[in-house]
Amino acid sequence: MTQLNHLTISAPGRICLFGEHQDYLDLPVIPAAISLRIRLEGARRNDRDVNIELPDIDDRIGLSLDDASYRRERDYFPSSVNILKRAGFTFSSGFDCTVHGGIPINSGTSSSTALVMAWVKFLGLMSDQRITLSPGDNAELAHQAEVVEFQEPGGKMDHYSIAYGDVIYLDFQPQLAVEHLISRLGTFILGDSGEPKDTKGILTRVKQQIQTVVQTIKEKESDFLLLEAHIDELEKYRSVMNAEQYALLRGTIMNRDITLQAREALKAGTLNEESFGELLNQHQSVLRDVLQISTPKIDRMLSAAMQAGAMGGKINGSGGGGCMFVYAPRQTDQVADAIESAGGNAYIIGIDEGVKIERAVE
């Protein structure tokens, strides 16, 4: 089999339209790939070393294909090599790579997952087997390398969103399934607050809180399922939890139901933009008031964008900082200016395709 000698892969960032903090509970989500991308370019070496230049963050990573041990926290480049090796991939030579990114870092738009997705796709094609990974295989291997290998609390939403691109409905029960929804949406504005966020800490806190609530209910009613619970029937569980836990349970079910409503809206032939925007606002209300993952600055950015003509929006990602976004099919420039006036860095974005091969040379 002829080897590739030079390869460029790109991967998009993503926003979570609906279902924030739901995927790790096996509840459905609606993410969308966005038109901010990472590009990984690499060429084959004559030895088994791997050198990766990261000029955007003034960093460089080196490893050997014979010793892909972990030297950093969340050391995704060697972990991806190790995961692919365990899956049967072999590598006869190393690579020189350069990564350039247009996705805000540590902001909730999945820049790290985009990087891992591009790297795993690159490794599959540059392996001795020269395999073009399917979107599903790309997502699963990258999830193993990024989340499972380091026992992180995150789910699979980011990986599948970036793998498939566009707008998808991702369901996890009874088994994982991807449904493509409308992708011809109007313009969004992403606003980076510049506030650093503690992704691992927030994911762990919220995940553990709701898992504790579910376990408490199951001790009383063993067949309880978040996927099937009706919000009107939650009152009967109030006695086995405190007020904060009950609010979290209701908020989780509300977010699930908002996601299901959004799925129907995005399957319709014509999108009702006002209703779509209002669903985003409802989701943000739960994230802000119940899960408490928004921040005062992001709330100000959202308010300013809405006053300037945006139709709806929410915080994006695990929360506690990072980015928000709004749907602004009209008055786009005014909305972007309003976000910047509120202290954010605005990006005008659209829905984009998933991981793709940009250039391949034998």
Image (cartoon, grey):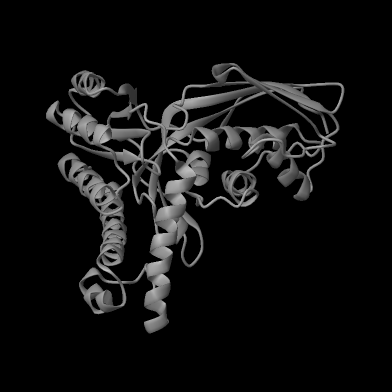
Q: Residue at x 54, y 35 (%)?
A: 112
Q: Position of residue 243 (x, y in %)?
A: 25, 66
Residue 360 visible to an observer of this rendering: no
| Quadrant location, the C terminus | top right
Q: Going by the image, does 207 lie left or right of 325?
A: right
Q: Nearer the viewer, residue 89 or 217?
A: 217
Q: Going by the image, does 359 lie left or right of 336?
A: right
What number of labels is visible? 0
Residue 121 visible to an observer of this rendering: yes
Q: Position of residue 315 (x, y in %)?
A: 31, 39
Q: Residue at x 24, y 69 (%)?
A: 231
Q: Going by the image, does 12 lie left or right of 344?
A: right
Q: Residue at x 25, y 49 (%)?
A: 283
State whether residue 223 is above or below residue 144. Answer: below
Of all residues shown, which one is farthest toward the front? 242
Q: Position of residue 290 (x, y in %)?
A: 26, 54
| Quadrant location, the N terminus | top right
Q: Nearer the viewer, residue 112 or 158?
A: 112
Q: Residue at x 81, y 34 (%)?
A: 65
Q: Nearer the viewer, residue 18 or 169?
A: 18
Rendering quarter of residue 31: top left
Rendering quarter of residue 215: bottom left
Q: Going by the image, does 358 lie left or right of 160?
A: right
